[in-house]
Image: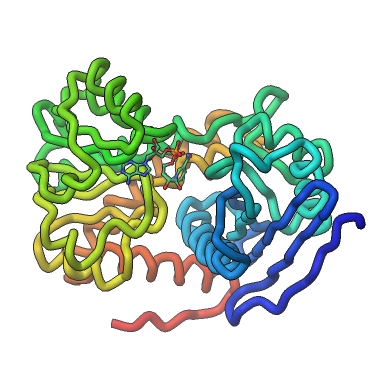
Amino acid sequence: MPLVITEETPPDGYERLIFARDDESGLIAYICIHSTLCGPAAGGCRMWRYDNLDAARTDVLRLAQGMTAKNALAGVGLGGGKSVIVGDAAKDKSADLLRAFGRAVDHLGGQYYTAEDVGISPADMKIVSEETAFAVGLEGGDHGSGDPSPFTAEGVFQCLKVGARNVFGRDDLTGRRVLVQGLGHVGMSLAEKLHGAGASLIVSDINQNAVNDARDRFRADTCGVDEVFDAQMDIFAPCALGGILTMDTAQRLSAQLICGAANNQLAEDAVAEALRARGVRYLPDYVVNAGGIISVAGEIHKAGDSYREARLAGIATRIEEILEISAKTQRSTTRVANELVDQVLADAAGTNLELTA
Ligand code: NAD
């Protein structure tokens, strides 16, 4: 049976949700378009071992909505969307499966651009691109942007310096204790930058090889994965999983500043207020980790390096603005960022939004 695409009814506030299935290649995927108010939707494709279809559907909805917020504040003229493929990237991925996914993306006719996310590499995206012009994050070519991770790391690093200036009165990181949780594509690159800036690193990862590597390269202290929230640090840089900032960990954390790449760090929005009440500055993840999508947007818009550089610098400026408004209004940085997103979307929709005090 060829690729079967089913249009599902999305929840309120979402534009489109499609389910794609190709029995020959084993493809089972969701593609969600949350919003095209700011432009065609863009967001990566994640391949993950979901327990069931409901879990995959829930994830794609949450991630697509997050992309709307990220893309709106990054000013990249793109809306929010995301895709997930159900399966083990190490075992189930094949060229046929990726091509079938490419045909599903192409079915949306340019309403959605896909790129790399967890489990999907630039080499995989190249195969997807054989079936659709709406696959980006490609290596080579006139505008190919390749792996977005170094740009994500650079954006996080710049924001971390803004945060340090705000909290400690100076952005010189010499001797600052920074704990980097997760030493993957972004975390290792960030650790390298922090080491170069003189920070004193503590590193943690479930992958012992990565921990040993960082320990040797950056003279980093190491920390068990269960000890992170009890370690002594000035700055916490979460670059692994989402959902790590809970009411409990927010109380335990010794850091005065949180700035990292991981998506969806807050287990619930109320944690942002709990952190604020303790005097901990939390820099909203979807603002600081926008470097990757900025890099991808340059490819979509066929723009030069100056496009990317200007917007990358804009991330740090946005964080300064958010910290300033947060201090002035005594509202959490998350609430301030969410309100700025609402404003961008309202402007894009040509409506006037009444913001609540
Ligand atoms: P990655 O898969 O390369 O790295 C993740 C690392 O976290 C791995 O080394 C893994 O072993 C480690 N890890 C997993 N569970 C852990 C735990 N409990 N404790 C400590 N370490 C753990 O991913 P990445 O591309 O570096 O992305 C990191 C985070 O940043 C993810 O949340 C991702 O969604 C987000 N993000 C990445 C980009 C990008 O450009 N790559 C852009 C925006 C957001």
Residue name at image x 27 percent, y 46 percent: 259
Question: Relative to 232, is 143 above or below?
Answer: above
Residue furthest to the right in view is 1
User: Do we see residue 197 in this rendering?
Assistant: yes
Residue 99, position as x, y percentages in the image: 80, 42
Residue name at image x 17 percent, y 65 percent: 248
Residue name at image x 70 percent, y 79 percent: 9
Q: Quadrant of the N terminus?
A: bottom right
Residue 37, position as x, y percentages in the image: 62, 66
In this rendering, position of residue 309 left or right of residue 200: right
Q: Tell me the quarter of the picture where residue 142 sits.
A: top right
Residue 145, position as x, y percentages in the image: 60, 31
Residue 208, position as x, y percentages in the image: 31, 29
Question: Relative to 313, is 282 above or below?
Answer: below
Q: Quadrant of the C terminus?
A: bottom left
User: Do we see residue 301 in this rendering?
Assistant: no
Q: Tell me the quarter of the picture where residue 121 sits.
A: top right
